[in-house]
Amino acid sequence: MRTIDLHTLTGAYALHALDDEDRAAFEHHLRDCPSCAQEVRELAATAVRLGIAAATPPPPALKDEVMRRIAAVRQEPPPTAAPARSAVRRAGAARLPRWALAACLAAAAALGGTTVWQYDRARDARAEASRAEQRTQRIAEVVAAPDARTRTEALGGGARATVVVSQSRDEAVFAASGLAEPPSGKVYQLWFDDGGTMRPAGLMDPARGSGAVLMEGRVGDAAGMGVTVEPAGGSERPTSAPLALVEFPV
Amino acid sequence: MREAVHIGREPSPRPDLDELMTLVAQGDQDAFAALYDALAGSVLGVARGVLRDRAQSEEVAQEVLVEVWRTAARYRADRGTAVNWVLTLAHRRAVDRVRSVEAAAARDHRAALLDRTTAHDEVTEQVEVRLEHEQVRRCLRTLTEVQHQSVTLAYYRGLTYREVAELLSVPLGTVKTRLRDGLIRLRDCLGVTA
Ligand SMILES: [Zn+2]
């Protein structure tokens, strides 16, 4: 194939739409053509946006299976000596050991008996499934938004919190991993922090100690978010001291 | 009870799945779990589009995610985001699978094509219905019909540009350029930088 033709293959290459022979020729060309290499990077990133838009909720068993498998898979060593860096800066945050977190949960559980604000709407399974799909997709969109800012922090005891905020979408995603299960009859509730006033932002799935949640409602002027333990169904206002307060990344 | 944990006085300069990936490369399973939560839905969506079959797409998604764990040390933040790295790998693997399945089955080429695409109008419609992403849907609408169909069939159905040309009955050269100028238009509409 002539070089002039090869330059036009950036799109097909980025979409994995070349057969093996054309791909080999184009990859050879790529080594000597910086403008094609740059265009391929951009068009591949564009294709990724198409992928994000097609997100669909994975069955819970998939995560179990993947986590089980990676525990048994040996990782490739880094190509060179591992860079000495701590990727996640703790920014001076106090770290709670797991027992302290458990103590917080127990104290919160003891409060009990506060106003319960139950969702009492009929559940349509199909509508729920479709909502789950939309949530998964919206989570992926927030995470991939061009202006998405993320903060990942250790909460201590192996628990980790991640907040992703997109100002352009006015949405935020919260994810926690390694968090102790809430006490029976309790849930983790998320809040937007509007200058000290906590605004309800949805519940974390009580069945899972980890997972990403699209925070309900708009970010608006919130400067951060918090997590509390609340009675099942959630509360209108926090009824316990927050387990974590996270300032939104700027 | 101790004071609540106040986190993050200093904003991190980079957004960060990329940082999670660094932790994953160091064997951090919690970091991998967080990465999984952020990306598994997109990985599965990509695989399902190309493979159609639920069981096969879940199998490929699983393979891809395990490969991400295994080869995380190869990820280079200076060459692109972690999202791009993972989803590009997912699409590559899904396409490899669909092509190897077809080769192994030695199915009639045209029958395989039709099987994968049904009517292409229907495909683009299905895809559009599923795309909740307003911006992507809006930007796809700005493409010409041939650009739109070519990009959709190649990305969401894993067709090669020769197969797209055959299916749409347009010359090879036309498909090549439509894939390129279609993606360029999408790139500009979405404001993608790399
Ligand atoms: Zn070139």
Image (cartoon, rainbow, N blue to C red):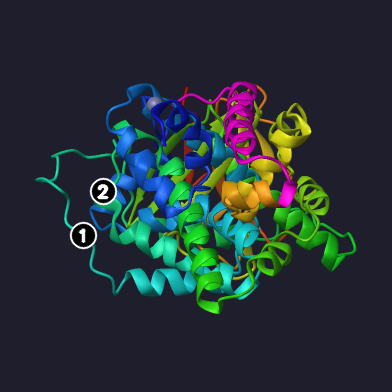
**Residue beneath label 2, please?**
B74
Q: Is residue B84 left or right of residue A174?
A: left
Identify which residue is drawn at 90% across, 64% down.
Answer: A122
Q: In whole angstroms, how far apart are the C-alphas of marks 1 and 2? A: 8 Å
Find out whether the residues at labels 1 and 2 contact each other: C-beta distance under 8 Å: yes
Q: Is residue A188 above or below residue A63?
A: above
Instruction: Please provide the residue range marked out in magenta.
Output: B167-194
Q: Is residue A91 visible?
A: no
B49 vs A33, nearest the viewer: A33
Give the chain letter at badge 1: A
Q: Is residue A237 left or right of residue A37?
A: right
Residue B131, horizontal then vertical, whole percent: 73, 45
Q: Is residue B84 above or below residue B69?
A: above
Per the image, label 2 sits on a secondary structure element best described as helix
A85 vs A183, nearest the viewer: A85
Per the image, label 1 sits on a secondary structure element best described as loop
Identify which residue is drawn at 58% across, 38% down.
Answer: A49
Residue B74 inside the magenta-drawn segment = no
Residue A225, horizontal then vertical, whole percent: 56, 36
Mark 1 Cα within 10 Å, few/some/many (few <14, many 20+)? some
Image quadrant of residue A129?
A: bottom right
Residue A63, horizontal then vertical, whole percent: 50, 68
Q: Is residue A21 left or right of residue B51?
A: left
Identify which residue is drawn at 38% across, 64% down.
Answer: B66
**Residue beneath label 1, please?**
A76
Q: Is mark 1 within 8 Å of ligand 1?
A: no
Q: Are marks 1 and 2 on the same chain?
A: no
Identify which residue is drawn at 57% across, 36% down.
Answer: B176
Q: Is residue A65 visible?
A: yes
